[in-house]
Amino acid sequence: MVFNSSIRYVDGSLRIDDVAVAAIAREVGTPTYVYSLKRIGANYERLREAFAPLAGQIHYSVKANGSLAVLRSLAAAGAGFDCVSAGEIDRCVRAGARAEDIVFAGVGKTRAEIAFAVSQGIGWFNVENLAELSYINNAAAAMGADAVKVALRLNPQVTANTHPYMATGHGAAKFGLTADAVGEILTRTSDFSRLDFAGIHLHVGSQLGDTAATLTALDAALELVAGHPRVRTINLGGGLPVAYRFGDEQPSLGGLVSQLDSRLRGYEVLLEPGRSIVADAGVLVAEVLYVKRQAGQVFTIIDASMSELVRPALYDAHHEVAPLRKTIGETVRAQVAGPVCESADVLARDRQLPRLQAGDRVALLTAGAYGMSMASNYNARPRPAEVVVSESGAEWRVSRRRESFDDLARFEK
Ligand code: LLP
């Protein structure tokens, strides 16, 4: 059975590229995130090629997975980076990114973060309110920086087809500037002598079910900038969906690109994909601790929880469960739950799974995006180890060791 070009069963054993996941789990323990750098590279290349007709740059959205090993691999492949904090910018610089390939976005940048970003000489600021423009302008003046590129983020007031927590472009969302505000700012750009108002930024949501909201937003943006020839760059944000369920199809990129191409001739196009580059390259490996039959249900209690992977609890998100050793035969309807003291700590509900026993290991699939990056220490759980399988697919290494109790106590006195 093949999940994607890197993650599949070979002779009944789950592999990531050439490496048996069970071998990693034996050495590193569980819970552990494992990522295929080969699959991450392939996803990046697939997007780069598909969007090549639009001739823009891809800024990988660091929030999806900010592991240094992942950032280094993408930087070496030529990717740029979309950051939402000074901390993310710092990680990208450490990973070898060029400052001009970094975009700084976010609805609440502090003045210190803005100063840090200007001092690094990053490529773009995606701007979400008027006062922020003054802060960037002042920081640039103080540091002698000129022509700092800004993209005004338009809130196009369209509701994207996705989970309400992931829709960002509707009128009630905190994100972006209204069309009126963008129009207003574009008439007074001379107030900000250090800024180059070269772009418009859009991001209507994540895991988008279709392209309708993106195209509506784009049309609104193009209408808005029609009288402003200085604006030559359109940043379309992220949001490309991935297949979380067996049998889900990934939508074709070709269709989207051709819809965009006719509208965007003459513009430079930037993208900020996160999930579509890393999600299906990562799994969270866990061990079955107990199997409990109760109230007509089978609870499979594993050693991973909402502390390590919060998506099911937060968005009712679906992650497939794949045993590391494939078993054929009878299946049972089970609730795969974690040890955390919350009823929401169920990682997979009502799944038809092989009969698992204590000691068996499973992988939660498509966990490479918004997994470790959203992990917490809730219930004083040390955050898991991270392992990367190399770009060649042949070797693996621990890229982040498991946290210890000392780590958890380190900042307290
Ligand atoms: N650009 C902006 C301005 C964003 O807000 C986001 C995601 C992205 C790019 C990247 O979007 P992507 O390509 O990954 O869809 N924690 C949620 C997802 C939140 C997304 C936040 N913004 C989840 O686990 O599904």
Image: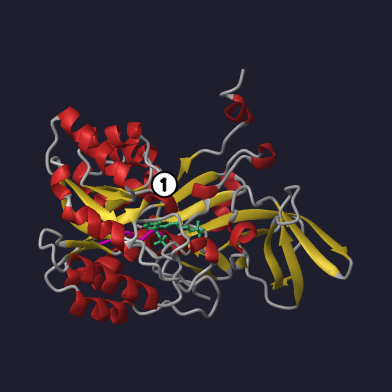
Q: Position of residue 367 (x, y in %)?
A: 52, 59
Q: Quadrant of residue 357?
A: bottom right
Q: Position of residue 292 (x, y in %)?
A: 84, 60
For the residue pair 12 and 404, the one nearer the viewer reads as: 404
Q: Residue furthest top?
A: 413
Q: Residue furthest right?
A: 295
Name the residue located 33 percent from the left edge and 55 percent from the top edge. Answer: 60
Name the residue located 58 percent from the left edge and 70 percent from the top edge. Answer: 12
**314 to 257, vertically: above or below:** above
Going by the image, does 149 lie left or right of 349?
left
Q: Position of residue 109 (x, y in %)?
A: 37, 41
Going by the image, does 239 lie left or right of 54?
right
**101 to 293, vertically: above or below:** above
Q: Quadrant of residue 354?
A: bottom right
Q: Position of residue 78 (x, y in %)?
A: 22, 54
Going by the image, does 91 lie left or right of 282?
left
Q: Secondary structure at mark 1?
A: loop
User: Is residue 245 in sight in this rendering?
Assistant: yes
Main secondary structure of the magenta stretch:
loop
Name the residue located 61 percent from the left edge and 30 percent from the top edge. Answer: 408
Q: Where are the magenta residues, as a range? A: 270-274
**182 to 137, vertically: above or below:** below
Mark 1 lies on residue: 66
